Image: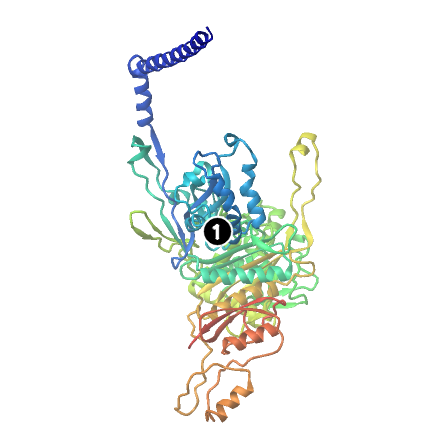
Amino acid sequence: MMKNNKLAVILSRYAAVIALVLLLCGWISFRLVDNTVIHASNWNNKADSLLNEIVTVYPDRGDILACDGSVLATNVNVYTLRIDYRTDAFMEARFRQSVDSLADSLAAYFPIRDKKGWKEHLMRPLKVAEKSARTRNHTLLKEISYDQYKLVRRFPFFEIKNCNRTGLTKETHVKRLYPYGEMARRSIGRTNQPKGRLIGYSGLEYALDSLLSGTPGKARRIPLTRNIVPVADTPAINGATVVTTIDVEMQDIVEDELNAILTKTKAQWGTAILMEVSTGDIKAISNLERKKGDSSYCESMNHAIAPVEPGSVVKLVGMIIAMEDGFASNTNKTFVTERGGFRYQNAKAIKDTHFSQSGSLPVYSLLEYSSNIGMTKLVAPHFEHNPDSYRLRVGKLGLFDRFGTGIAGEQPAFYPRLANNRGGRIAMSRMIYGYTTQIAPLYTCALYNAIANDGAFVRPRLVKGLKTSDGRDSTIAVSYVRESICSPANAKKLRYMLRRVLTEKGGTAKGINSDLVEIAGKTGTALISKERPKYTHADTLAGRVKPFVPGYLEGHYRLAFVGFFPYDKPKYTCMVVIADPAPGIRSAQYTSGATVVAIAENLYSRGMLDNSSDFRVEVPESPQKYPELYATTSNSKVQRLENDFGFDDYGHFSTPVRHGSGIPDVVGLGVREALVLLEESGFVPKFSGAGYVAAQSPLPGTDAPYGSTVMLTLGDN
């Protein structure tokens, strides 16, 4: 009886299982018939819609190159590595055995964590007991290169070839790489990546986005054995490569010198532009601003293209007009200046800072002394009948035209319209010596470049050519804002006036005249105007009104210098602007001017001014030729030449080593002696090349702070 009962129970259970299996088979059969027969058309349409879906294929973004082909911006594939702790084949036991070695390798090659930190990071997901509850995408490393990925695959545990067993996965995406880091960042620009596509938002990246982005293509999906992949119907056209005018070596010089003067003066920001005279090519451009809560500087907003009140550098505009319109053709004509100032239109007295005594100045000395009174008396009377005619005359020079340099955000000069009354005449007089108007440093630099270029106002440019994805190269021709803004004869006279600024006793930059490079230029000092108060949304809702009285901030200056060199045959024009230096610093010549001189001398020392090196052996009177050796500061080595090797007559380098103030002169020394001498003097030497020291930067005698870096270029001749 007991056996019969047990058998009945077992049979009933078998019957229940068989019934469930039959029901499942019936449901599967029904779904099979439903999908393949009854609703087959619906599923076929859905499949067709997926396969026929047109997807956008984004092209590769074009590169940005320096003038010599060096890469300033390019695309690279980067990888994010993750670990799937829930994969069925994950070898947990082996992972636990290898975790110490794995953490040690990660700490050695990716020191974002130490060994202990890496081990904790790797083991954290395993604290969850249930495997089904563990994470599938535990981030290991972000944005690593392919070589780094291959390195990780050789680490303990990850060397297993089957990634299903290690759980290691990689995600690939494109990143915009800037090999030179912050160099010329605001001019080259940057990109962001919404929805996976690189889009420029500043600088060249933004201004030339349509060229760099290329043309998207179209693709449709096709099924393969294990996947559905897109196949292009219309191929994407990759973006063009943009060749800029930037010279990496010159850019490095300009940025170093600008950073040095900003650090020394503790200024708020500064900008520097180096432009080639004949072509308008911007060889270097830098914009540095002090970090908040820090004394260091980084690339900031592009101040080079932001209009500001220019100060006395704008006096060249009035002088060009005076020369071309004939009322300054006699450069010996004199103008009386008054100690107490000149009250034009009975307004507030116009005063001269650099020629305060009563006397007279000839036209050719007005720029030299930066005379506000002289320039006003020279120019203003000729436009009194209609003050706005002065603004219109300035416009004929081309300062109101957009240059189209390729830099996003470029703004032309702004001269407000002037009423034909006393107020308009007073405003016009202020325009002549640098106020009530706004000009971007780039525009001022370009104007001086025109004078260096015999009056031809060449258009500044940051882009010199394009290389399309199909292999075509195109060069952008040099163009002109104006074919001529003055005659070559007047340009020559103006260059002479600007040269006097550095050579004559009344020159506002006489203290920085260089013995190596002849420079002509102009200083400019302007008070910084007050900014209107900023309103928050809460201020607006509350109806708060913040009082504002227009005017200038007492003791806050913007110091500028713009010049070209070499004077006899100008090759480059350079402008430096320093804004809001430490209290008490208001000398444009020893800040901005000294920086332009340092840049020019750096170019000279590297042979970039069509000059040959001055660091050569003096030729003796006799025809005897000497073996070329490096210089030395050691008397014992000289005596050894005489005693042991029999040299009783030898040539020597013409640049002796100086041990006075500033950076010592180590040109001609062997690298070991140069390093010792610089380190003993409190500087940090770095060198490149082989042989003896052929050039150094900064130049010998430069007053640099303790711990400054001195770059040495080595050579054999």
Say left or right for 357 vs 254: right
Q: What count of labels does the image hold?
A: 1
- Residue 398: image x %, image y %? 46, 52
Residue under the image location 49 percent in, 92 percent down: 642
Q: Amino acid at mark 1?
A: Ser
- Residue 637: image x %, image y %? 52, 86
Task: Mark yes or no: residue 369 visible.
Answer: no
Front one among 225 and 66: 225
In this view, 564 is above or below 231? below
Say left or right for 375 vs 616: right
In this view, 97 is above or below 488? above
Front one among 142 and 517: 142
Say left or right for 160 vs 445: left
Q: Quadrant of residue 337?
A: bottom right
Front one among 547 and 380: 547
- Residue 151: image x %, image y %? 44, 51
- Which secondary structure lies at badge 1? helix
In this view, 259 is above or below 79? below
Farthest top residue? 1
In this view, 214 is above or below 439? above
- Pick the quarter of the image with the C terminus: bottom left
- Residue 583: image x %, image y %? 69, 58
Residue indicated by mark 1: 187
Residue under the image location 69 percent in, 64 percent down: 339
Task: Mark yes or no: residue 604 visible.
Answer: yes
